[in-house]
Amino acid sequence: MNNIETISIDIDSDIKTQASDLAKKMWSNLDIVVNHLLLNFVKNKQDTNSFRDYEWFTKEASEDLLKAWEDAKKGIWITGVYDNFDDLFKHLDNIKNN
């Protein structure tokens, strides 16, 4: 990697601590772990460690998130702040059914 860029991401502090501790135990660090995940994401053209592992991430949920992404790119924003995915999906269902 000749071109190095810096990114900033928001992450749950407990997850960051656990991931950092685990990486250290494996003689690694979060930079290497994140680079590896991003490389696999680009190489495979998909997230191999993804939401698909969660039972709530159905085909419909995937389609809803993709639509929200496409809408956002067009400047159509979903308003509100959601504390969890259930609330978000309820709101998306409301929009879809109206």
Image: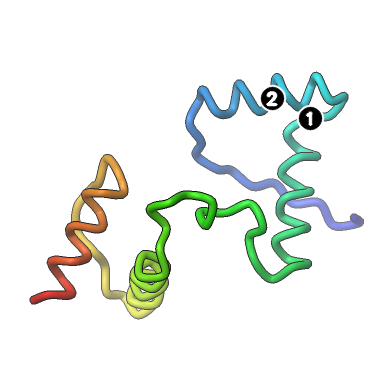
Task: Say which residue label 2 marks.
Answer: 20
Residue 11 position, x and y percent, is: 51, 36
Q: Residues at badges 1 and 2 in contact (C-beta under 8 Å)?
A: yes
Callout 1 amino acid? Asn
Name the residue rendered at 40%, 63% in the picture.
58
Name the residue rendered at 47%, 49% in the picture.
54
Residue 28 position, x and y percent, is: 84, 29
Above or below residue 58? Residue 36 is: above
Find residue 59 and name its label.
none
Callout 2 amino acid? Ser
Residue 84 position, x and y percent, is: 29, 43
Element type where label 2 sits in the image: helix
Residue 69 position, x and y percent, is: 40, 70
Above or below residue 4? Residue 92 is: below
Name the residue rendered at 76%, 58% in the picture.
40
Quadrant of image for the C terminus = bottom left
Above or below residue 15? Residue 91 is: below
- The answer to which of 47 and 20 lies nearer the viewer is 47
Task: Say which residue label 1 marks.
Answer: 29
Relative side of 20 to 94, left or right: right
Real-space Cα separation, disc 1 to disc 2, in angstroms = 6 Å
Element type where label 1 sits in the image: loop
Question: Disc 1 or 2, which lies upstream in sequence?
Answer: 2
Quadrant of image for the N terminus = bottom right
